[in-house]
Amino acid sequence: MAVGPQGRKQDREQDQPLSGGMMNTVLRRGARVVRTAPPHAPALQEYLTALTASGFEGAPRPLALYEDGTEELTFVEGDVAVPPFPIWATEDWVVSASARLLRRYHDAAQHVPFDPGAAWPTALSDPEGGTLLCHNDPCLENLVFRDGAGHALIDFDLAAPGRPVWDLAALAFYMGPTLPPEVLTESKFARADVLHRLSLLAEGYGMSAEDRRALPETIEQYNEVSRTFVKSMLDQGNPLFVDIVEQAGGWPAWERVKDRRSAWLRDQRPAFLKALAA
């Protein structure tokens, strides 16, 4: 599907920048999204096409891959929360809705083949690997809601093989959100009951007993992988992450917060296990 960019010049005046992208430029062009393609775009587009063909409607459908390093996908209509998050995005129903969406995705993905030899990104991937193509970054900015339900996952750039519980740990990391109380109270999620929200996540997804037992330690793993990811983005000069770290008072201050979160997660493991088993 590779063509040159010259055939698209007439559309440029209609381009609308979309916020929330971490590592690339994202524009809306009518019913399409135009964005910088990841290096493994051919394999990812093949997978997303097969995912749509399987009957799963909760992901963008690839339309084109261009020689100038951009790609086009279908635009998914709905509500997407971006910082500073609106109040609705911090409510408990969002946890349940997101968990149900993730379950629908995993149920579909287990039947959709992907190229095991492709250079899938390792930035946020499951260190233990797996046979399912995990999304790896199911944060609020990558979830589309409609009428109080989770409708779609977007931005599969960081998708890679892993275990389903890895995606669940990522969802808990963002949606719990699994933050120490002193950090939580300074966030938009100040009223969140983390233990209750973990229980909602498990119930919404229909987690197995085995995954419930594995989730707390897997959240700790995801926390450490995310630390390495942010440091790599900072080293690359990514403006979004540079701004995040600067707002936190610089890298040493940001890392101290991350250390507190790591220690708190270890301390909370028994409480997390109890909430998940209830």
Image (cartoon, helix red, strand yellow):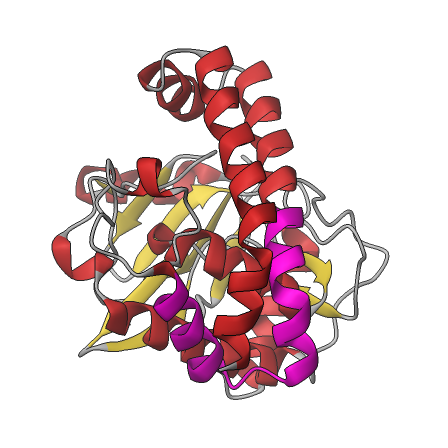
Q: Position of residue 265 (x, y in %)?
A: 55, 47
> Most extreme residue toward the right, as rendered?
117
Depth check: 266 or 169 in front? 266
Depth check: 19 or 243 in front? 243
226 drawn magenta: no
Depth check: 91 or 256 in front? 256
Q: Position of residue 246 (x, y in %)?
A: 37, 14
Whether residue 33 appears in this view of the structure is: yes
Q: Position of residue 177 (x, y in %)?
A: 39, 52
Q: Looking at the rendering, which quadrant does residue 43 occupy?
A: bottom right
> Most extreme residue toward the left, as rendered?
87
Q: Residue at x 17, y 79 (%)?
A: 147
Q: Is residue 167 above or below residue 103?
A: above
- Label count reads 0
Where are the magenta residues, as a range?
195-222
Q: Residue at x 45, y 69 (%)?
A: 59
Q: Residue at x 46, y 27 (%)?
A: 257
Whether residue 45 appears in this view of the structure is: no
Side (left or right) of 216 relative to 210 = left
Q: Residue at x 64, y 39 (%)?
A: 224
Q: Main secondary structure of the magenta part?
A: helix
213 drawn magenta: yes
Side (left or right) of 148 relative to 5 = left
Give the quadrant of the N terminus. Answer: bottom right
Q: Position of residue 94 (x, y in %)?
A: 28, 69
Depth check: 186 or 1 in front? 186
